[in-house]
């Protein structure tokens, strides 16, 4: 399980969960104004040119898309390029690997406020018990309470009330 606590600047904290990375990605995508491929994508320069209607790396492709061709020439035509607009900037392609998890966490962070992601029951319980300084202390009681209610709803913790 993946647990998320969101503390918007002008609203009450909320907690939610995802069953796995794919479910996490779907839920983040649903609340993001960007297209899924803008949040995270990986494709080669050859695939990118093909998507743009150029099945071959020819003179026309080089003339029309010099930046893509330069990436293909320098990194290899079948090497993966990564796009993660919230991490790298709008439309930036990088040959340096970008993790899908980091891209989706950046999409959450772009919503504003505080976002905490816990990958697993142990991490979420630890955060509720005060191990995460971002939501520890009495000033963050509402955020911890939202996490607690999510953990109880999923029967990870028992409701002692």
Image: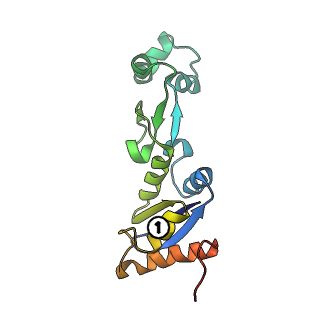
The residue under the point 53% across, 21% down is 46
| Residue where numbered disc 1 is placed | 6
Q: Nearer the viewer, residue 32 or 94?
A: 94
Q: Position of residue 109 (x, y in %)?
A: 42, 58
Return the residue found at the far bottom: 161
Label 1: which secondary element:
strand
Relative placement, left or right, of 124 versus 152 is left
Q: Position of residue 131 (x, y in %)?
A: 40, 69
Q: Nearer the viewer, residue 117 or 11?
A: 117
Relative placement, left or right, of 14 versus 139 is right
Q: Position of residue 80 (x, y in %)?
A: 49, 28
Q: Position of residue 75 (x, y in %)?
A: 42, 21
Q: Is residue 38 above or below residue 72?
A: below
Q: Is residue 82 above or below residue 145?
A: above
Residue 34 appears in the picture as rendered: yes
- Residue 116, located in which quarter of the rendered image? bottom left
Image quarter hosting the N terminus = bottom right
- Residue 67, located in which quarter of the rendered image? top left
Return the residue found at the far top: 59
Q: Nearer the viewer, residue 88 or 131?
A: 131
């Amino acid at each position: 399980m993946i647990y998320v606590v969101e503390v918007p600047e002008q609203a009450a904290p909320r907690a939610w969960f995802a069953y796995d990375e794919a479910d996490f990605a779907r839920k983040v995508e649903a609340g993001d104004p960007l297209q899924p491929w803008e949040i995270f994508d990986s494709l080669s320069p050859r695939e990118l040119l093909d998507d743009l209607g150029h099945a071959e790396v020819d003179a026309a492709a080089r003339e029309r898309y010099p930046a893509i061709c330069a990436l293909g020439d320098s990194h290899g035509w079948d090497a993966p390029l990564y796009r993660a607009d919230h991490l790298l900037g709008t439309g930036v392609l990088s040959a340096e690997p970008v993790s899908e998890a980091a891209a989706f966490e950046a999409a959450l962070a772009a919503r504003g406020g505080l976002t905490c992601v816990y990958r697993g029951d142990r991490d979420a319980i630890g955060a509720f018990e005060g191990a995460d300084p971002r939501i520890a202390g009495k000033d963050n009681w509402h955020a911890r309470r939202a996490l607690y209610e999510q953990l109880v709803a999923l029967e990870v913790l028992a409701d002692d009330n």
